[in-house]
Amino acid sequence: MKVGWLMRVSIFFSGALLLAAWPAATQQPGPLAQVERGLWDVHATNGGEIGTICVGDPLLLAQPLHPPRGCSAEVEAADGHVATVAFVCPGMGRGRTQIRVETPRLVQIDMQGISNGLPFALRARARHIGACPG
């Protein structure tokens, strides 16, 4: 009887610790934590429109040219207002992006990489424009 009670208490506290640690593990470090969630409009600095992105995770801003499905991204460095993110999209490409957070609603994006076997470089500006549709 005592072993069963002890096991239930142990499981309860383990679950409580896991739930307490979970939000900290899923938050973005440094400047990306400041980025507002919602709909973002992305334009290349040369004036070309890239499109809109529904951002639930600020790492999506690191790969505006690649759909997020199947891609992985990792923050390599975060200092002050700049985060450096490496991403890999199997079968499509990979790259490295620097995201400069000017304000929670405005970021500068500077990325380089390989897309469909060809090198690319992109400088863009992204602005938060509201809530995501739906």
Image (cartoon, grey):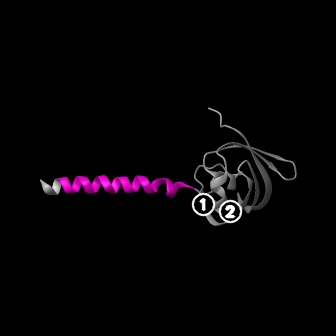
Judge whether 131 appears above or below 78 on screen.
Answer: above
Badge 1 crowding class, 10 Å Cα cut-off, few under 14, some 14 to 19, many 20 or more, is some
Q: Which labelled disc corresponds to residue 49?
A: none
Q: Position of residue 31 (x, y in %)?
A: 67, 59
Q: Label 1 vs label 2: CA separation?
A: 9 Å
Helix, strand or loop status at disc 2: strand
Disc 2: which residue: 83
Q: In the image, what residue type sits under mark 1?
A: Pro
- Mark 1 and mark 2 lie on one chain; the one further toward the N terminus is 1
Q: Are marks 1 and 2 in contact (CB under 8 Å)?
A: yes
Q: Is residue 74 visible?
A: yes
Q: Is residue 92 visible?
A: no
Disc 1: which residue: 29
Q: Residue at x 41, y 52 (%)?
A: 19
Q: Position of residue 67 (x, y in %)?
A: 65, 48
The dominant secondary structure in magenta is helix
What residue range appears in magenta?
5-27
